[in-house]
Amino acid sequence: MDMIKTAERTYYAPQGGHPGQNELLTGRAVFTEAYAVIPKGVMQDIVTSPLPFWDKTRAWIIARPLSGFAETFSQYVVEVLPDGGSERPELDAGAEGVLFVVEGELTVSVAGKQNVLAPGGFAFLPPASGWTVRNESAAAVRFHWIRKAYEAVDGLDVPEAFFSSDQDVAPSPMPGTEGRWATTRFVDPADMRHDMHVTIVTLKPGAVIPFAETHVMEHGLYVLEGKAVYRLNQDWVEVEAGDFMWLRAFCPQACYAGGPGNFRYLLYKDVNRHARLGGYLGSRAR
Ligand SMILES: NC(=O)N[C@H](N)C(=O)O
C-alpha cells in the first residue's frame, strides 16, 4: 500500500520492497554537483539503514551535508513498525528537527506532552528538547525527519516545540498567481527565531514557477502528490509523487505542474541567517 488517503488528501509513502532478479530499476536517479534526484523506484529495502537506539525502525537517508559545513540539513524517510520507536531519537544536542507523517500514526512526546500525528501531521522539535517517539498503532508508520544544526542568535530565544498539520493550516497564495501557486507555512516567516522552514508547496495543474529561482538557500523537495516537470540547473526532469530532489545552494529551479491533480511537495529551506563568512573576518567571528 503506498497511496494514503486522509479525509481531505492522498499522500504518497515510499514502498520499500526488494527488486527481483529480472528487474532493472535504475530509473531516473541523477546525481550532479548542483542537484540529485532520488526517484521512488530506487527507495528499496537494500538502501535502508537502522539507527542507533531506534527499535523496529529503518530509514532511507535521502539527504545529508556532503562537503563539510557547506550544506545545512539531512532528511530521512523513517519507517517504524508497531511497538517500535525511540527514547533517544536524536543524539546531537545541537540538532533541531521536523517530523512530517505520510502514512500511519506516530506518537510524539515532548516535555511531558503526547501528540498522535496522523498523515499530514507536523512536529517542530527544538534542540535538546528530549522528544521521544513510539508507534502505538497496529500498522507501520512512515514519516519524514528533517534535521539541521540550529543556529542560535544572541538575544533571540530558541523556538518552542509545536505540533500542527497540513489539514489545519490554510495555504498562502503567492501574489499574482490567483491561488494557482500556494504555500502551507507552519511557521510565521517573520519569526527570526527559526532558521529553517519546512513548508508544503501546492501548484494547481498547469501552474508554473515561472523563472529560474536561483538563491543561496538549499532545498530538499519530497513530492507528496501529483506530477511535474522540474527545471534543475540546466536540465528538465520529470518527477512524480514519491520522488525526492536535493538542491544545493544556487541551483537554478523552476517547474511546470502536469496534472491532472495538484502537484504538492514538502520543501526544506534554510532561512533567516547571515551567510557564513570565510577568510579573516569569518575566523575572527567564530
Ligand atoms: N523550488 C521552490 O519551490 N522554491 C520556493 N519557491 C522557495 O525557494 O521558497
Image (cartoon, rainbow, N blue to C red):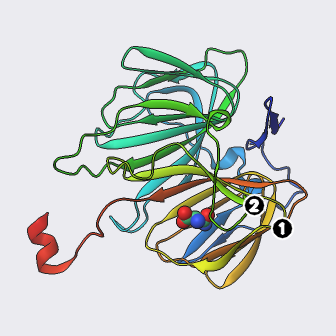
Residue contact at pointers 2 and 1, CB within 8 angstroms:
yes
Return the x and y of residue 68 as percentages of the image width and height: 34, 65
Return the x and y of residue 46 as percentages of the image width and height: 68, 47
Sequence-wise first label, 2 or 1: 2
Using a 10 Å C-alpha cutoff, classify the residue at mark 2 as few (fewer than 14 neighbours), some (14 to 19) or many (20 or more).
Answer: some
Q: Nearer the viewer, mark 2 or mark 1?
A: 2
Return the x and y of residue 111 as percentages of the image width and height: 36, 19
Which residue does the numbered mark 2 point to in the structure image?
Answer: 180
Rendered-image quadrant of the N terminus: top right
Say whether residue 27 is visible.
no
Amino acid type assigned to the residue bearing label 1 in the image:
Gly
Tally the marks: 2
60 on left or right of 159: right
Using a 10 Å C-alpha cutoff, classify the residue at mark 1 as few (fewer than 14 neighbours), some (14 to 19) or many (20 or more).
Answer: some
| In the image, the residue with mark 1 has its CB under 8 Å from the nearest atom of ligand 1 | no
Q: Secondary structure at mark 1?
A: loop
Q: Nearer the viewer, residue 252 or 68?
A: 252
Return the x and y of residue 160 as percentages of the image width and height: 35, 33
Rendered-image quadrant of the C terminus: bottom left
Which residue does the numbered mark 1 point to in the structure image?
Answer: 206
Question: How far apart, in angstroms, are the residues tagged by discs 2 and 1?
Answer: 9 Å
Q: Which image quarter has ligand 1?
A: bottom right
Amino acid type assigned to the residue bearing label 2 in the image:
Arg
Say whether residue 202 is visible.
yes
Q: Nearer the viewer, residue 71 or 174?
A: 174
Residue for point 39% across, 69% down: 67
Q: Secondary structure at mark 2?
A: loop
Label drawn at residue 184: none
Q: Where, by quadrant of the figure, is residue 39 drawn? A: bottom right
Residue for point 72% across, 58% down: 179
Residue for point 64% across, 47% down: 171
